[in-house]
Amino acid sequence: MTSAEIESLGVRVEEYRHRRTGAQHLHIAADNPENVFLVALRTVPHDSTGVAHILEHTALCGSDKYPVRDPFFMMIRRSLNTFMNAFTSSDWTAYPFASQNRKDFDNLLDVYLDAVFFAKLDPLDFAQEGHRLEFAEADNTDSDLVFKGVVFNEMKGAMSSVTSQLWQKLSKYLFPTTTYHYNSGGEPADIPDLSYEQLVDFYRTHYHPSNAIFMTFGDIAAAEHQAIFEEKALHKFDQLDEIISVDREKLYVAPVRVEEHYPLPAEEGLQEKTHIVLGWLLGDVTDLEQALTAHLLSGVLLDNSASPLMHLLETSELGQSPSPLCGLDDSQRELVFVCGIEGSERERADEFEQQVLKVLEDVAENGVPYEQVSSALHQLELQQREIGGDGYPYGLQLILTALSGATHRGDAIGLLNIDATLEKLREQIKDPKFIANAARELLLKNQHRVRLVLAPDPDMATRAEQAEKKRLADIKARLGEGEKQQIIQTAKALAERQSRKDDESILPKVGVEDIPPELPRVDGETIEVNGNKVSRYSAGTNGLVYQQLVASLPDFTDEERLLLPYYCQTLSEVGLGDKDYLQVQQWQAAVAGSLHSFTSQRTGLEDLHSQTGHFILSGKALAANQSGLTELMQATMEQVRFDELPRIKELLLQTLARREQSVVGNGHALAMAAASAGFNRAAADGHEFGGLQGLRRLKALIKSLDSSAGLEDLAGTFNGIHQKILGAERQFLLIGEEDKLTDFTNALTPLTKGNGTHYGPDKDDFTATPVQEMWVANSQVNFCAKAYPTVPMSHPDAAALAVLGGFLRNGYLHRTIREQGGAYGGGASHDATIGAFRFYSYRDPRMAETLNDFDASVEWLLNESHSDLQVEEAILGVVGGMDKPGSPAGEAKKAFHSNLYGRTHEVRQAFRRRVTEVTLEDLQRVGRTYLQAEKASTAVVTGNQGRDAGLALNLHEEKL
């Protein structure tokens, strides 16, 4: 139909339409061997039963060509994929994967197409993945009924997040009549209302090529893809008469003000725990010019601490920090702009709303200085030009950018090809009234505005629990004996199905023979500038430069060591010389894409009790701004001032808010860090800095800052840390396009510094201690972890331990913890950097049973018979993870930092080779050697509902 070259992205985008069914295909042709496929279906639910989400899970449980119980998870381990998943959004469901291996890509494409368009939808899979009734004691009809199901428990975990509740409740009022009014993932109270018949009906109307968008990226030609789409799926379908779409919302004629509640245990304290947010609808996401104007306005108002609206949110006495929802959301049919605060009180809502409107009136009346608008546009351009790929594959990022336009039958290519619109905006912002008019029209005059107050309710969780128990009791009271027996029979049938050994050989696979012999290699060169080492890497960065100042980490006092993460967070957020922090924020926005600092520490290759560390100041910019970035980095190191005490406290409060919000989404990692914390200093640091112990310490630190003396002491400690880092030996990392590297290197000269102190490895005298802990958080589900001390990367057993994690997950833990236990996920992995083998579960309704399953998996390993194919699948998983590509800049950073700690290409290549040689005997040997019950440490993250279960296991209660 149409195509376009997008020079700034280095791709050509082609759009096609299938003649018979009307299916759309968007192909992004790129000179990139990591090919990406995604098929999306427009899914528009009209309730909160989670029908689209449960269907996404159930469709992956067997298809016509591959009638095995779990082809999706089976293919994960029979593949060298670099990405494999499925997502349910508010108005689409997508099935993406990526691979660098053509055989593997074709295998996955075959399985995905069959899963999406020819799903079996077995009622037992619906019971497993969606919801079902079971008796608490399997065969005892006198015991209580309980709800079970993977999505049911997943959404209990997801909706434990206050941020998720805030967004869902805001959407309910911003979208009174369209699909976004509902929770597409499913509300736990509504999920049991969904019937199997409703699921099948939804599949028949929505999972059809006429309602599908095929999207591909990479170096395979569009015609090759289309031939497979036709052969495997499309030729079996005709045009679907029904058009699935989302209508525009009916707009309010006056702003709406509402109050809702969220559960919070009384012991956490209810004071200043209220969220106040304002949300607007700003128009159609498919109108590219309007959408980019809205993005620019959002950037001008919220990009950084000097932006007028963000300045209010950060400094207002009415709340503790800006809301996590702040910004522009473009993932739905209509753009949503949100600003707000958290850590507030409900009676402050009127005053807060007036403060926000006053800022917007000032912008509409007086505009914003051209430099700030230009900086916001500069940030938009950076986002457009930067080649990502360190989280999701780069091709998938581009595909998801275009997907919202395609979903709503708009200009999907236009969403990628924004250069012309950016140029138009560059001209428009020369008019001082442009942003003023945008603020007036899009926000001030816009009556479709919702003010939501979300206040804590200490009894809400108890009421919800009692309502669920009453509902189950009422259902049980209405059951006849035959219906009770049917529940028992369904549970038995499901257990038998879960235990059944399917014929995996019907699924395609790659094997160890398909693994490339060499780990992908990224080489740079090292030169000296003024006695400082500069490592520089040539990479296709699309006109960006990345540079890092890397200093040897000095010897710190215990107090300094614990405050180091907060020093790093503060360093680039405060004033420099005669500039206050607001002026510095504007300076950063004008010249840099980002500037931040952090520390990294790694154990020795052969000694877990020896650590080396570095301080890193990291920045990126458009190539034309590299000298400006260097000047900014130099000022940050030489002129930083820690005298803006209210700003420092404000930054720590924002950090606390982010850390608290992340507990429920990251509970399994926090539990694993807690379980490992007694092994060695490196493991303890993970718990103390980024873990639950660190969160607890941060809360205590903030309490100590109520007095100016406490703040002055903290600022003094930050200054002491900074002086030590200034005196440390420096080196530099530089990444850019080859023809610019020499100029970039010369521009670095002002940052170089001779005669810095070199600090060698730090040997700790850490005393190992076992851990048996339960951390109580605001969560409806559990996150369980068990850890065992092991060995560093250079040890001969490290490769087998790496493979063992996947072996136990694939063969035992996935079945018992997810399928039978109902947790959203579970598994095991080895972390050679801290010498820990760790089991984990995620969003888990169980506790003691899961911990028993961890132990039982070791018995299964040692006492059952296993095949070499199972070992090969686990090997593929480890190698696939090692070979997974990042962005061009990300690959260079990874190579540099690996080399910094002795993990050279040769060391990693040797480890990879040992992984490919692991045998079943190796796995059983390391299991017998390291996974001994008496060596285990346990940590669980739970909520109040799990407290008694944790105490019954003799876990020591830890409070946040």
Image (cartoon, rainbow, N blue to C red):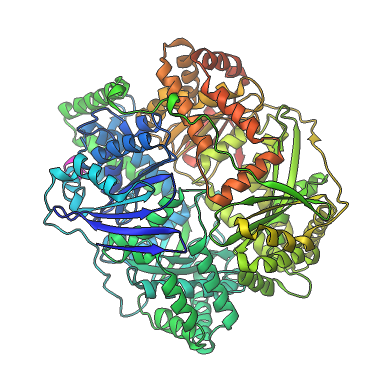
Identify the residue at the far right of this view: 755
Q: Position of residue 44 (x, y in %)?
A: 25, 56
> Residue drawn 60% across and 18% down?
930
- Quadrant of the rendered structure where residue 927 is? top right
Asked if one can make out residue 805 in the rendered structure from this viewpoint, the answer is yes
Q: Position of residue 474 (x, y in %)?
A: 24, 40
* Quadrant that contains the C terminus: top right
Q: Position of residue 42 (x, y in %)?
A: 25, 55
* Left or right: 240, with 841 as reference point: left
> Residue drawn 43% across and 50% down?
31
From the image, give the main secondary structure of the stretch colored magenta: helix
Up-down relation of residue 399 to residue 416 (above or below): above
Up-down relation of residue 595 to residue 21 (above or below): below
Along the line of sight, the residue nearer the viewer: 112 or 860: 112
Along the line of sight, the residue nearer the viewer: 210 or 784: 210
* Left or right: 148, with 757 as reference point: left
Q: Position of residue 146 (x, y in %)?
A: 32, 34
Bounds of the magenta segment: 195-199
* Quadrant that contains the N terminus: bottom left
Does the segment drawn in magenta span residue 463?
no
